[in-house]
Image: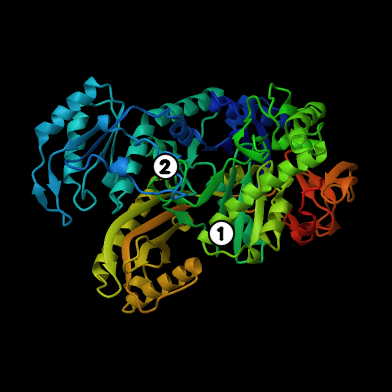
Amino acid sequence: MRFATDTGGTFTDLVIERDGRLHLFKSPTVPSNPVEGVLGAFAVASEAFGMSREELLSQGRQFIHGTTHAINAIVTGRVAKTALLVSEGHPDILLLREGGREKPFDHTVRYQRAFIPRTRTFEVPGRLTAQGSELRPFDEEAVVRIAQQLRDDNVEAVAVSLLWSIIEPGHELKVEEILREHLPDVPVTLSHRLNPSLREYRRTIATAIDASLKPLMDRYIGGLEMAMKDAGFSGQVLVLTSQGTMVDADEIRRAPILALNSGPSMAPIAGHFVSATEATEHDAIVFDTGGTTFDVSLVRGGRVPFTHESWLGRPYQSDLTGFPSVDVKSVGAGGGSIAWVDDGGVLHVGPQSAGSVPGPVCYDAGGTEPTVSDASLVLGYIDPDYFLGGSIRLNMEAASAAISEKIAKPLGLSTEAAALAVLEVWTENMVQAITDITVNQGIDPTTACIIGGGGAAGLNAVRIAARMGCPTLLIPEVGAGLSAAGAVVSDVGRGYRRLFVTNSEEFDADGVRDTLAELKAQAEAFAEKVGASEAAIEIDYFAEARYAHQVWEIDVAISPDDLSKPDATDNLRAAFHDAHERIFAFRDEDSMVEVIAWRAQVRCEVAKTKELRIAGEAGATGADRSRKAYFANVGLTEVPIHTFEKLMPEVVKTGPAIVESRFTSIVIPPGVTFRRSSSGNLVVEPGAAAASISIAS
């Protein structure tokens, strides 16, 4: 038995793999103590299995944990008191940073403060050249004095990022040796070891983030392991990473930056799994709508794209993570997003969220601001007596009153029209996020399928698909826990990177071969450490390349065998031209191709599950019941309510309808056809929904 959890801002999802089938459970997240929310989900599961929580946990061999603890600590400023050591003369790396302004002439938005302030930035005498030779000698006594000051200042972590350490790490290693001697209990991160990037800022910010998270994540992971052990679990603890894989908990202690986007990176993994068996389109757009955020990602030609452009806050005006990760765009748009009308009479939805505490008004737990969930309840899209399988009873009257008072009256609309307006604005926020990520990756949404996951996805998934012009919408059977399900089928894995500059005109075949061999050795050492069999190991290789004089690189999938042949240069150029054309819609056959760095991504298969199927029995055909629901251009009408698990495979039905499970409601507008596939997923053709996408007044 294997367990996977994804801790969101509102609910904690738990997926249990048992006998090749999945069991999904949800429990409210406890923001003050996320581990308590995880154990709460196990309590719900143990009750469903008819056994004690201790008995259930004792049967598990693996526990896979996705967490937002690291990113939340950065956003809220709860990271460790961290010092930064840089080369003499370069104290402003984190102050100058990269970026710009989203709106060039809007100077009302201020830049964030440097991630580590100048008061805790120290200059290390000594300098290396770009070739790795020593230009000025390393000053050991100066570093000893710095260490003594750090001790006096009660610094909790240290980041070290010296110039050209990626070529020759000697000076950084000497700094580490001195710090170990004088500050033995203070964690240290070295830039050349963590993120061997050519760009000084990206290498430095990644190092600073990693160091600042080490004390916090060490306590968190230690507390998680102890809590699970005390509760009865004795198996292996794995943590999801931002690179779409999972690693042993000790690896997160050594490099906590890996867990920065821990949970969201799993949705495209699950989406890839679903699209490979269900979709006919070459590309897939994957979105995961939770209670707090909306995460959108891609599966492109069978691959999940990576990015080096993950921002910690406002794009261009905050800090980058500086670390490669699965390309996921997140916006504050979830089921708990708060709807509000500004002084100018304009309706907004989010980014503020009611979260799990106090939650939407309909939860009856102290919430006073109307949310998307409240609007959906008013529209009849959610059954107040069947939310989370009936474990939470929703207050329709309170939700209706909040929508009426704070949305309908200021806008001069009926309560139902106001609730529909909330969903339309919510949908537009999501459509913009999808447009941004698809255009950036060169994807035409009208030729891609779209996969919706998350507990709140079904409320507007058809609207989103129709607005984007996607021909097919897939709602996986396990969609309400998409990220946790992705964790169950994900691999144990790690990414490795090496700087080696060459180009297609002066291609250094020996240097490339040695670099790829070094990456392969690291990947194989990781696989050996986790005990993977040779048949279960897969290593993907990438070149970070660009045309001559371009500023940024793109990832190009490569084969080491192709680059060891006499026509290696032609193979590299062809792979780059194809990748560049897919993203930017043009290629320059006459231009030189320059490679800056090389990357290996090792994956060790551990999952036994071959299908993302929820355990349960199919029932009779037909609608189970009906209720009134409100649709644009139709108004309030009686619609059939279908139970997801009871839909007979390959039987085509037409909306209006609502498809319900214990964890989600999928709204099917009038005229839209849908069916449940033989793989158990809901397949929707959203074209007819386009005509109904308007706000009824």
Crowd class of label 1 (few under 14; some 14 to 19; many from 20; radius 10 Å): many
User: Residue flagged by tag 1: what amino acid is it?
Assistant: Thr
| 460 with respect to 635 (left or right) | left
Image location of residue 294, percent across then percent down: 60, 44
Q: Which residue occupies 50% across, 41% down? A: 262
**Residue 650 sits above or below residue 97 on the image:** below
Query: Alpha-carbon distance for marks 1 and 2?
Result: 23 Å
Name the kind of residue labelled 2 in the image: Ser
Which residue is tagged 2?
A: 318
At 66% across and 66% down in the image, what residue appears? 280
Q: Which residue is mark 1?
A: 438
Image position, residue 144 (x, y; %): 14, 29
Identified at 38% across, 45% down, the residue is 529
**Residue 136 in view of the camera:** yes
For the residues carrying marks 1 and 2, which lies nearer the camera in this image?
A: 2
| Left/right of residue 128 with respect to residue 49 in the rendered view | left
Q: Secondary structure at mark 1?
A: helix
Can the viewer see residue 232 in this picture? Answer: no
**Quadrant assignment, res 373:** top right
Q: Earlier in the sequence, mark 1 or mark 2?
A: 2
State which quarter of the image contains the N terminus. top right
Q: Position of residue 8 (x, y in %)?
A: 58, 36
Query: Which quadrant: the C terminus?
Result: top right
